[in-house]
Image: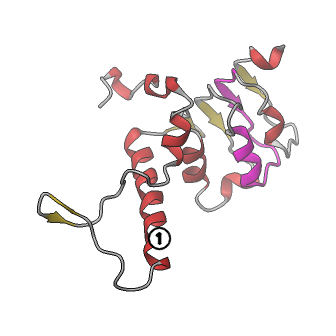
Amino acid sequence: AISMSLMVLNVQKNSIWQASQFAQCQALERLDLSMNKIESFDEMGALFEEGACMQINILEMKGNPVDRQHKFRDYVTLMSPTLTVLNGKEITQTERRFLVNREAAKARSRKFEQNPAGQQQEPEFDGISGVLLMEPGDSDPIGDRRANRGHINEVPRKGGGEQA
């Protein structure tokens, strides 16, 4: 079926309001949904659910109402660990790590707020006390998806350098 082999799709200026209809295109590497009518983060999330758009690395969303929403870039970056370019701008590993760490810190903060005062202690590692940004067991949306996407470590890096 075409949905298993289609790699590039340009559907800009088509009054599309549902991005989820392209989720079945599992081989997509490049998707241009520019200048459509996509408004919902949920519609964007459907593109990146398990089994959907597993290879996508370039996504264009300029001119959609959802593109103007607060934290759009952050949301999409966290949803798709394979995405390397969003709206013509590279997603760096530094940016991705920052977003993952920020989300983990928020989740940890919520855990701290839920515990009664005095029960939570800051961890201490080799005599250094503080709070780690990522700890084993923390919610890690990128890591969770990476477990099912072995090719994530094969994403090309700017300058062709080796991955850290």
In the rendered image, residue 54, in percent from the top left (x then y), is placed at 64, 28
Amino acid type for the residue under numbered disc 1:
Lys
Residue 50 located left or right of residue 77: right
In this view, 2 is above or below 108: above
Task: Using a 10 Å C-alpha cutoff, classify the residue at mark 1 as few (fewer than 14 neighbours), some (14 to 19) or many (20 or more).
Answer: few
- In which quadrant will I find the C terminus? top left
The number of numbered badges drawn on the structure is: 1
What residue did someone put label 1 on? 111
29 part of magenta stretch: yes
Q: Is residue 21 above or below residue 79?
A: above
Please name the residue shown 29% across and 74% down the image. Answer: 121
The x and y percentages for residue 5 are 74, 14
Q: Which residue ends up furthest to the bottom in the rendered image?
A: 117
Q: Pick whichever, 104 or 78, lies toward us.
A: 104
Image side of residue 163 versus residue 144, left or right: left
Q: Is residue 129 above or below residue 8?
A: below
The image quadrant of residue 86 is top right
**Residue range (magenta):** 27-47
Residue 54 as seen in the image, left or right of residue 37: left
Q: Residue at x 79, y 29 (%)?
A: 24
Q: Which element is circle 1 on?
A: helix
Instruction: Residue 8 in the image: state x and y as whole percent.
Output: 70, 20
